[in-house]
Image (spheres, grey):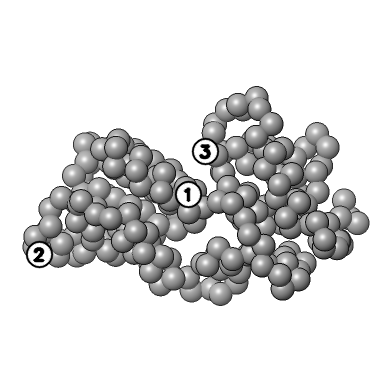
Amino acid sequence: MRILIIEDDADTAGYIAKGLKEHGHSVDQANDGKDGLFMALENEYEIIILDRMLPGLDGLSILKTLRSAAHQTPVIILSALGEVDDRVQGLRAGGDDYLVKPFAFAELLARIEVLARRGETKPDNSLLQVADLQLDRLTHRVRRAGQTIELQPREYQILEYLMQHAGQIVTRTMLLESVWDYHFDPQTNIIDVHISRLRNKIDKGFAPPLLQTVRGAGYCLCTPAEQAQS
C-alpha cells in the first residue's frame, strides 16, 4: 500500500516509516500540516496517518478540508490527547480511527490492515494477476502456477508496481521514485540486483518467463501475447 504520514516529530515519523517499509509498504512523509494537506490532495494513498497537533495547519483542519472535498481515504489520527472528548472530536471531524501516543507499532499496523480491508470494495483491486502469476495485496501472498513464492519486502514492492503496470515499460526512474522514494539516480546497480533476484524467484522453473528487460528503456512484466506484440 501507499501510505502518507503527516507527523512533525521526526523520530516518530521515522519509526513509523521504517516499520511500514519493512512490511512492504510505500511511504511518503510530510512534517507540517500545509505540506501534508497538499500531498494528500495531489496524490493517491490507501491510508493516511495524521498527527493531530501540527505546525502550519492542525490535523483536525486537514481532516475537515479533505472530507469537505469528498476525499475518502481512510485516516488514522495519532495524538497525545487521549481523553474521550478528544477522540470523539477526531472521529467526528472525519477520522476513521484514533490512536493515542505512545503506541505500539504492532497495534498501528493492525489498525492499518483493518482499514485496508474495510476500504477494499473491488475484489479485483486486491488480487493482481499476470498469466499464472498472482499477487494478493491484502495478504502479501505471491503465487505462480499455484506455488507460493517467498519475497523480501523490496522484491514484493517491485513486483506489485510491475503488476500494476503490467504490459507497460517501467523505467528505472519510475522504480526509484515509487519503490525507493529516490528522486535522483544513486548511480548504483541496486535496481539490477533486485530485478535479478525477483526474476530468479518468479521465472526460474516456470514457463514462459514474464519479467522482461527492455534494453535502454526499463522492464516489463508481460504475458506471452504481449511479448509477441512488442
Q: Residues within 10 Å of mark 2 (few under 14, many from 20)?
A: few
Which residue bears the numbered disc 3? 181
State the image quarter where residue 18 is shown: top left
Looking at the picture, which amino acid does disc 3 mark? Asp
Q: Is residue 98 above or below residue 213?
A: below
Is 191 displayed left or right of 81 in the figure?
Answer: right
Q: Residue at x 62, y 27 (%)?
A: 185
Kind of residue sitting beneath label 1 = Glu
Residue in the picture at 51% in, 67% down: 138
Out of 56 and 205, give the one closest to the viewer. 205
The residue at which mark 2 appears reads as 84
Q: Which residue is mark 1?
A: 22
Mark 3 crowd level (few <14, some 14–19, many ≥20, 10 Å Cα) = few
Mark 1 is surrounded, within 10 Å at the Cα level, by few (under 14), some (14 to 19) or many (20 or more) other residues, namely: few
Image depth: mark 2 or mark 1 in front: 1
Q: Position of residue 111 (x, y in %)?
A: 34, 64
**Which one is earlier in the sequence, the residue at label 1 or at label 3?**
1
Q: Is residue 30 left or right of residue 186?
A: left
Mark 2 / mark 3, whichever is N-terminal = 2
User: Which callout, 2 or 1, points at the residue further toward the start of the chain?
Assistant: 1
Q: CA distance from mark 1 to mark 3?
A: 14 Å
Residue situated furthest top in the rendering: 187
Residue 52 x, y percent position in the rendering: 21, 49
